[in-house]
Image (cartoon, rainbow, N blue to C red):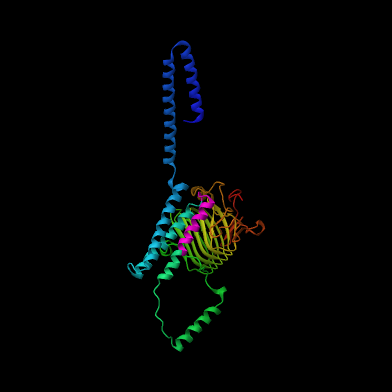
């Protein structure tokens, strides 16, 4: 019973008791007490019922306590398995079995990291950073154990010719011009599932082209799409997609229509990417500008020289596609970036807001020599 209800009930009972003492009808006061107590009990039961209904209706995937409880349980399980492997020294089941167990743990850690990214739009910033730190600590422990359990190679004397050949190969590798190499950040593990690289339709291995992909070729919003291993390309994705994946691109301009779900951008260098999505995760990007419209906090990690600006694009049908994707309102968090690789209280040095004077102008879309001016209000507000 809340204090206010309790005081009110006590006051009424006190009045009835006084009246009962004056006229000899104290039994009426007792009946009133019982009636008031029953009414208050019914009221509290109704309040509790409504709370249970609201709790049942709430999406469990958006409950901070539910997420952290499940996340901590998985971390504890993984840590227990790592401790068991450490104590056994790989003897139980053999070294190969131990390496397979570590492979399974690595996959689970990637899944945990992905779940934190997907929950970042409702997780408090501290909880998101702490969760990523826990995953990083487990990954480090896994890597250390993998090295410890790796079979030792038998020592042998190498021949002079083999040693000379090895030295020449090392000199060739060190003299290779880094500017001509394909984009790759080897310090960070790929977050993209291997099956996506072959199963998901898209553009792969293209060089030096300008391509316009219409909505029909993108599945009209019901399919996923992949851009992979592109260099010196300009690509217009003029339609909605369920999900978009960008992997290993260099010196490219990517202009994308709205994404109904999530977007993963990985291993990009010296590019300009424009996209609207519900969730955007940027992994291993270098010197790249992102023009974003996003309903949750954009996530960056293992990045440097990243700059963000508001999404501004136009093609015929874009407004309808944005409405269908649930991206037509002004709830835009493009500049509220979370850097999961920067856990200090100071601002991350890995990303910044692109100054307005340096942003590209997309007030007209020019394709194949034709320029189409967007109508007023067709681009998202800055």
| Residue nearer the viewer, 41 or 321 | 41
Which quadrant of the figure has residue 46? top left
Which quadrant of the figure has residue 52? top left
Q: Main secondary structure of the magenta part?
A: helix
**Looking at the image, can residue 241 be seen?**
no
364 up-or-down from 269: above or below? above
Q: Is residue 131 left or right of residue 351?
A: left
Residue farthest to the top, as pictured: 23
| Residue nearer the viewer, 214 or 343 | 343
Residue farthest to the right, as pictured: 357
Look at the image and say whether residue 129 sits in the magenta stretch: yes
Q: Is residue 11 left or right of residue 353?
A: left
Which percent across, then down, holds residue 342?
Answer: 56, 59
Q: Residue at x 49, y 57 (%)?
A: 132
Q: Is residue 114 left or right of residue 297?
A: left
Q: Residue at x 48, y 83 (%)?
A: 166
59 up-or-down from 42: above or below? below
Write the start and end of the magenta stretch as one range.
121-140
| Residue nearer the viewer, 168 or 362 | 168
Q: Residue at x 47, y 48 (%)?
A: 64
Which percent across, then down, holds residue 244?
Answer: 48, 58
Which percent across, then down, holds residue 109?
Answer: 44, 60
**Looking at the image, can residue 292 be seen?**
yes
Which percent across, then down, holds residue 173?
Answer: 52, 79
């Amino acid at each position: 019973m809340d204090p206010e209800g309790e005081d009110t009930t006590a006051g009424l009972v006190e009045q009835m008791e006084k009246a009962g003492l004056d006229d000899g009808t104290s039994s009426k006061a007792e009946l009133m007490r019982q009636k008031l107590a029953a009414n208050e009990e019914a009221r509290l039961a109704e309040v509790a019922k409504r709370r249970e209904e609201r709790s049942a209706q709430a999406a469990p995937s958006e409950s901070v306590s539910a997420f952290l409880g499940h996340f901590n349980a998985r971390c504890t399980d993984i840590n227990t398995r790592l401790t068991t492997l450490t104590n056994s020294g790989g003897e139980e089941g053999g070294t190969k079995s131990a390496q397979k167990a570590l492979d399974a743990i690595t996959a689970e850690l990637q899944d945990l990291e992905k779940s934190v990214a997907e929950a970042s739009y409702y997780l408090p910033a501290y909880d998101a950073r702490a969760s990523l730190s826990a995953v990083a600590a487990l990954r480090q422990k896994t890597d250390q154990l993998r090295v410890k359990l790796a079979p030792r190679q038998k020592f042998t004397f190498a021949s002079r010719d083999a040693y000379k050949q090895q030295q020449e190969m090392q000199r060739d590798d060190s003299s290779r011009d880094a500017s001509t190499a394909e984009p790759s950040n080897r310090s960070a593990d790929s977050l993209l599932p291997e099956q996506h690289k072959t199963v998901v339709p898209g553009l792969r291995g293209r060089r030096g082209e300008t391509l316009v992909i219409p909505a029909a070729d993108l599945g009209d919003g019901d399919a996923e799409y992949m851009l992979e291993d592109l260099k010196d390309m300009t690509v217009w994705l003029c339609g909605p997609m369920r999900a978009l994946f960008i992997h290993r691109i260099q010196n490219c301009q990517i202009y994308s229509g709205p994404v109904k779900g999530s977007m993963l951008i990985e291993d990009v260098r010296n590019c300009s990417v424009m996209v609207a999505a519900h969730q955007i995760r940027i992994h291993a990007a270098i010197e790249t500008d992102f023009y974003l419209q996003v309903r949750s906090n954009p996530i960056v990690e293992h990045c440097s020289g990243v700059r963000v600006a508001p999404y501004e694009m136009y093609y015929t049908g874009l407004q309808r596609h944005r409405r269908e994707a649930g991206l037509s309102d002004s709830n835009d968090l493009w500049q509220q970036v979370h850097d999961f690789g920067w856990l200090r209280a100071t601002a991350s040095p890995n990303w910044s807001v692109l100054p307005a004077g340096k942003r590209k102008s997309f007030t007209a879309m020019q394709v194949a020599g034709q320029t189409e001016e967007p109508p007023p209000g067709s681009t998202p507000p800055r």
